[in-house]
Image (cartoon, helix red, strand yellow):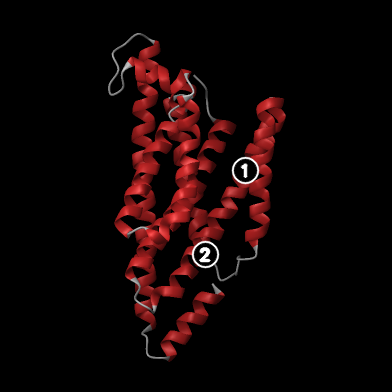
Amino acid sequence: MAQYETVRRTNAGVGVDATQIDAGLRAHMNKVYSLMAVAMFITGIVAYYVGMDFKRAVAGEETLILSYGMIDAMYNTALRYVIMFAPLAFVFGLSAMINRMSMGTAQIVFWAFAAVMGMSLSWIFVVFTGMSIAQIFFATTIMFASISLWGYTTKKDISGWGSFLFMGLIGVIAVSILNIWVQSDGLAFAVNVIGVLVFAGLTAYDTQNIKNTYLVHADHGDTEWLGKSAIMGALSLYLNFINMFIMMLQLFGNRE
């Protein structure tokens, strides 16, 4: 926030209308949230239909979009590990290659990532009840929106949270991997609780960071860079939301 006010005053002092900066920032944030919302929609649609097709196949009913062979491969062969880790490859790839891509290409890759993430998350429609998924999604949406709004409007500089949250994230990932072998319900509960807190903090941190990053390039009129920045900002917030949602679902969801 301090950086925002500083740049805003500096630009105003050299003849850049502060209202233009504010309007540009609002448009940029709207684009970030719009990209995130579309990605969430794609993920939800893909996850729902893949998950429902699995349930229909198990029940011996006709599937909607996937063949029995494809469903069997996705859930019962090594392909399931490819699907599981493919979203991670997309994240690393997009982050590393974004500067070499055109804005249009980056957006297509982002949509493809959202679809693959939907395939990876299809298991939730097999494990949890539909009502439970809807309720937890609604609760996560309210929580996410409130925290992101706070991150956008707060005058407090929370850039110092970055290293602390990163260490917390590494800890959550490490303990989650450990629990694959330990299979401790108590450890899983602790990881999910701490994970929700970490991703809530990252939501506020990333929102403020997106806001401040905009200012670095706003006065240069670098439309291509700002478009890519919006995609990366949407990716960060999308990942925060998805992880909060999954951990909330693990904590409070009702299983089939």
Residue 16: x and y, percent? 37, 86
Report the side of 138 relative to 176 (left or right). Answer: left
Depicted 52 relative to depicted 210: above or below: above
Identify the residue at horizontal 55%, vertical 37% (top origin).
248
Expressed as whole percent of the image width and height from the top left, the position of residue 254 reads 52, 25
The residue most toward the top is 60
Q: Position of residue 216 (x, y in %)?
A: 46, 74
Residue at the outermost front position: 100
Asked whether the viewer can see residue 142, the reply is no
Q: Which of 74 and 185 lies nearest the eye of the viewer?
A: 74
Give percent across and percent down for residue 15. Answer: 37, 90
At a point 59% along the width and 33% down the height, the residue shown is: 251
Task: Tell me the amino acid under the disc marked 2.
Answer: Asn
Seen from the viewer's position, the closer of residues 31 and 113 is 113
Quadrant of the rendered image containing residue 106 = bottom left
Quarter location, residue 181: top right
| Numbered label attached to residue 10 | none
Q: Which of the two discs, 2 and 1, labels the residue nearer the N terminus?
A: 1
Towards the viewer: 105 or 117 = 105
Category of crowding for the residue at label 2, using alpha-carbon neighbours closer than 10 angstroms: few (below 14), some (14–19), many (at least 20): many
Residue 209, disc: 2
Within 10 angstroms of label 1, few (less than 14), some, or many (20 or more) residues?
A: many
Q: Residue at x 60, y 69 (%)?
A: 157
Q: In the displayed structure, would residue 193 be above or below residue 97?
A: above
Quadrant position of the N terminus in the picture: bottom right
Question: Which disc is residue 195 wearing?
Answer: 1
Task: Relative to 72, say whether 175 is above or below.
Answer: below
